[in-house]
Image (cartoon, helix red, strand yellow):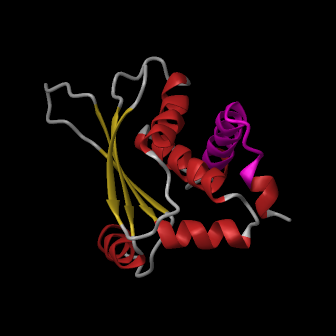
Amino acid sequence: MTALIDYQLATDATQVPETAQLERWVTTVLEHHPEEHRFEVTIRIVDADESQALNAEYRDKNRPTNVLSFPFEAPRGIELPLLGDLIICQSVVAQEATQQQKPLMQHYAHMVIHGTLHLLGYDHMQDDDAETMEQLERRLLARLDIPDPYLIEMQ
C-alpha cells in the first residue's frame, strides 16, 4: 500500500522534502503494519511560530518542536482511510540536523517515521515503550539506508 500524502507547505524555506519522499517514508512505516487500513496522512511543514502555538495549545509547552502528531479519530461506525496529521517545524528540524551532523533529508525521514509511529499509537512515555519505538525506527530507517539516528545523537 502506498501512502497518500496531503502535503501542506506553510513556510518559505526551500530545503524541504518532496511529496514523493514523504510518501516513501510513510509507506515504509505502513508496510511494517500490513493490518493497517488507514493510509492518508496530512504533513504540514511549518515555521517556528506555528509549531510553538500548536505545541503550547496541545502540549502546554511554549516552544517550537520538531514534530507534532495528531491521530485521526473517526466517529463511531465510520471507516475512513485517514491516519492523521503531522506538523513538522522546518527550522527546528534544520537546526537539529546541523547540531547532530546529519543530512537534512535523513533527519526529515526520521521525523516523519517517528511521527507516523505516533499516529499508529506508539509512544515513548515509559522506558520500555521508548526502546520499542526506537528499535522500530532504527529498522525502518535502515530499510531506507539511513543510519541509526540515536547512535549519531550520542556522538
**Residue at image coords 70%, 34%:** 139
Q: Nearer the viewer, residue 61 or 5?
A: 5
The answer to whether residue 143 is magenta is: yes
Left or right: residue 6 versus residue 96 is: left
Left or right: residue 1 versus residue 145 is: left
The answer to whether residue 3 is magenta is: no
Task: Please identify the residue farthest to the right as the structure is shown.
Answer: 155
Q: Where, by quadrant of the figure, is residue 53 drawn? A: bottom left
Q: Nearer the viewer, residue 43 or 136?
A: 43
**Residue at image coords 49%, 58%:** 16
- Residue 102: x percent and y percent? 73, 60
Q: Nearer the viewer, residue 81 or 61?
A: 81
Quarter of the picture holding the C terminus = bottom right
- Residue 84: x percent and y percent? 32, 43
Task: Please identify the residue farthest to the front as the structure is shown.
Answer: 14
Q: Which residues are magenta?
A: 129-149
**Residue at image coords 61%, 45%:** 129
Total numbered circles? 0
- Residue 1: x percent and y percent? 43, 19
Left or right: residue 40 versus residue 147 is: left
Q: Nearer the viewer, residue 102 or 153?
A: 102
Magenta segment, prevailing SS (helix, strand or loop): helix
- Residue 46: x percent and y percent? 38, 66
Vertical relation: 53 (above or below) 152: below
Q: Where, by quadrant of the figure, is residue 107 drawn? A: bottom right
